Image (tube, rainbow, N blue to C red):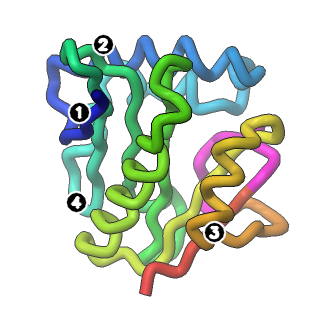
């Protein structure tokens, strides 16, 4: 059984490991991808600020098998947050936790006063893109903000009001 909870400092290494395992699976390990963000090694601290939250998914043994978070969009307009670093190990996929975690992150974003949620992704992450579309995210023609993720080639936004 999978459950989600807020990230703790003791989860940082495990979540970094998940990110570093999953991103190359989709060809997202070169320049311009989130795998190189400084926050990867200290996610709990990176998402402790105003308007931010990060959640991990743990299996029945307590092992971190995925996660996602929201934070104000770097270089974005006030009220715009970004869905960030949503990744799952293969054994955690296909169990409905992506949907549950994304809905939880969107509720957190609303609770924290954000009015729009933005995300960046990559062609080939078809299941994730399908989930984003299912929950109402609309495709954008160009990126927003200054995320530094020039390797991403698809951008989406959802109005949270």
Q: Nearer the viewer, mark 2 or mark 3?
A: 3
Marks 4/1 in contact by CB < 8 Å: the verdict is: no
Disc 2 residue crowd, few under 14, some 14–19, many 20+, Cα 10 Å? some
Q: Which residue appears at 63% of the width and 64% of the height?
A: 134
Q: Give the Cα distance between marks 4 and 1.
A: 13 Å
For the residue pair 58 and 87, the one nearer the viewer reads as: 58
Tell me the magenta residue range. Answer: 144-154
For the residue pair 69 and 132, the one nearer the viewer reads as: 132
Q: Position of residue 113 (x, y in %)?
A: 29, 77
Question: The C terminus appears in which quarter of the rendering?
Answer: bottom left
Q: Earlier in the sequence, mark 3 or mark 4?
A: 4
Q: Position of residue 150 (x, y in %)?
A: 75, 41
Q: Which residue appears at 47% of the width and 36% of the height?
A: 95
Q: Which residue is mark 4?
A: 50
* Image mark for residue 137: 3
Q: Which residue appears at 22% of the width and 60% of the height?
A: 50
Q: Nearer the viewer, mark 3 or mark 4?
A: 3
Q: Which residue is mark 2?
A: 13
Marks 2/1 in contact by CB < 8 Å: the verdict is: no
Q: Earlier in the sequence, mark 4 or mark 2?
A: 2
């Amino acid at each position: 059984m999978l459950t989600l909870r807020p990230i703790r400092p003791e989860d940082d290494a495990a979540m970094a490991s998940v990110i570093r395992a999953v991103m190359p699976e989709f060809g997202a390990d070169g320049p311009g991808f989130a795998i190189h963000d400084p926050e990867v090694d200290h996610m709990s601290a990176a998402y402790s600020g105003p308007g931010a939250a990060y959640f991990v998914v743990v299996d029945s043994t307590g092992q971190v098998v995925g996660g996602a978070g929201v934070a104000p969009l770097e270089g974005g307009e006030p009220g715009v947050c970004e869905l960030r670093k949503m990744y799952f190990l293969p054994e955690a996929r296909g169990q409905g936790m992506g949907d549950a975690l994304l809905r939880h992150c969107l509720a957190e974003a609303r609770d924290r006063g954000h009015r729009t949620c933005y995300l960046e992704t990559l062609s080939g992450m078809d299941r994730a893109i399908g989930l984003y579309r299912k929950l109402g995210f609309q495709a954008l023609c160009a990126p927003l903000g200054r995320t530094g993720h020039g390797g991403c080639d698809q951008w989406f936004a959802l109005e949270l009001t």
